Image (cartoon, rainbow, N blue to C red):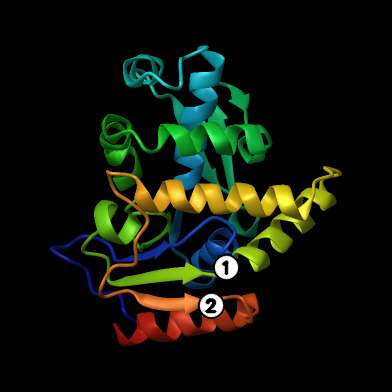
């Protein structure tokens, strides 16, 4: 079932797209259904953001950020449908990883080419048998350009803001649609316009708009495409 490898490397399904498009949930479901490993690249950058925060790094200074990340010691442990457990040293930072503060720092750090280069091998190390589901912004364009299937998963800004508001409400965090929409729009522009590894749909990617689709429909469409790849 679509398990051909490239140069003896395990197969990869690369899922790229903007924040809030449902990539994380879809990737987890695919990994469980196919029995593949899971890379949440956003977690890698958020872990880097936490490391920078703990080191009091100057986020506007590339050298300061690189200095803080010189000994990147975050580890990622798959938990099936529960996502990924993230440890920095012996500290569980999984919950802190999902805060808006860390998301904002990660977005700023991710525009730095030297940081992206430094974390490239970390991400590629997730590629192991029987295969990998890679979720991020540049999985198909930069990290795994030879992926067996590339997917660009998106949704309208309004839909993504509603989803994020629901997630935050479930955690007891109050917010407003206007602030969420502004944050998502700003992050989209930063991710899409950055000089290095911008958020773009690869020419050979399967384009999926999840605005009016449920998770099952999205997963089914991707699995079908992978079987034909």
Tell whether 62 sits left or right of 54.
left
Residue sitting at x 31%, y 79%: 2
Q: Secondary structure at mark 1?
A: helix
Residue sitting at x 66%, y 65%: 158
Residue sitting at x 51%, y 42%: 43
**Residue 40 can be seen in this image:** no
Lower sequence index among marks 2 and 1? 1
Q: Residues within 10 Å of mark 2 (few under 14, many from 20)?
A: some
Tell whether 13 sits left or right of 165.
left
Reply above or below: 199 against 88. below
Cα distance between the residues tagged 2 and 1: 7 Å
Q: Nearer the viewer, residue 64 or 157?
A: 157
**Residue 141 can be seen in this image:** yes
Q: Secondary structure at mark 2?
A: helix
Which quadrant holds the N terminus?
bottom left
Tell whether 214 sits left or right of 63.
right
Quarter of the image holding residue 203? bottom left
Tell whether 135 sits left or right of 213.
left
Q: Which residue is mark 1?
A: 29
Give the image location of residue 5, x and y in percent: 22, 68
Q: Which residue is mark 2?
A: 219
Reply above or below: 108 against 28. above
Give the image location of residue 4, x and y in percent: 24, 74
Which quadrant holds the C terminus?
bottom left
Reply above or below: 196 against 101. below
Reply above or below: 133 against 100. below
Q: Are marks 2 and 1 in contact (CB under 8 Å)?
A: yes
Give the image location of residue 109, x and y in percent: 42, 32
Residue sitting at x 50%, y 12%: 55
Q: Residues within 10 Å of mark 1 (few under 14, many from 20)?
A: many
């Amino acid at each position: 079932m679509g398990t051909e490898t490239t140069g003896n490397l395990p197969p990869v399904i690369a899922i790229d797209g903007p924040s809030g498009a449902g990539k994380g949930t879809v990737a987890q479901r695919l990994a469980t259904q196919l029995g593949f490993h899971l890379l949440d690249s956003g977690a890698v950058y958020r872990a880097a953001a936490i490391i920078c925060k703990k080191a009091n790094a100057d986020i506007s200074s590339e050298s300061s950020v690189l200095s803080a990340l010189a000994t990147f010691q975050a580890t990622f442990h798959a938990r099936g449908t529960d996502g990924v457990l993230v440890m920095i040293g012996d500290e569980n930072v999984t919950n802190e990883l999902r805060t808006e503060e860390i998301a904002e720092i990660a977005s700023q750090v991710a525009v730095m080419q030297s940081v992206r280069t430094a974390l490239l091998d970390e991400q590629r190390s997730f590629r192991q048998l029987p295969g990998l589901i890679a979720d991020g912004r540049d999985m198909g364009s930069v990290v795994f350009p030879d992926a067996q299937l590339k997917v660009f998963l998106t949704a309208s800004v309004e839909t993504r803001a509603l989803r994020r508001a629901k997630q935050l409400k479930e955690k007891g965090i109050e917010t407003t649609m206007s602030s969420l929409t502004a944050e998502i729009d700003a992050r989209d522009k930063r991710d899409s316009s950055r000089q290095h590894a911008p958020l773009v749909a690869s020419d050979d990617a399967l384009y999926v708009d999840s605005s009016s689709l449920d998770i099952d429909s999205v997963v089914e469409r991707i699995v079908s495409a992978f079987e034909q790849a």
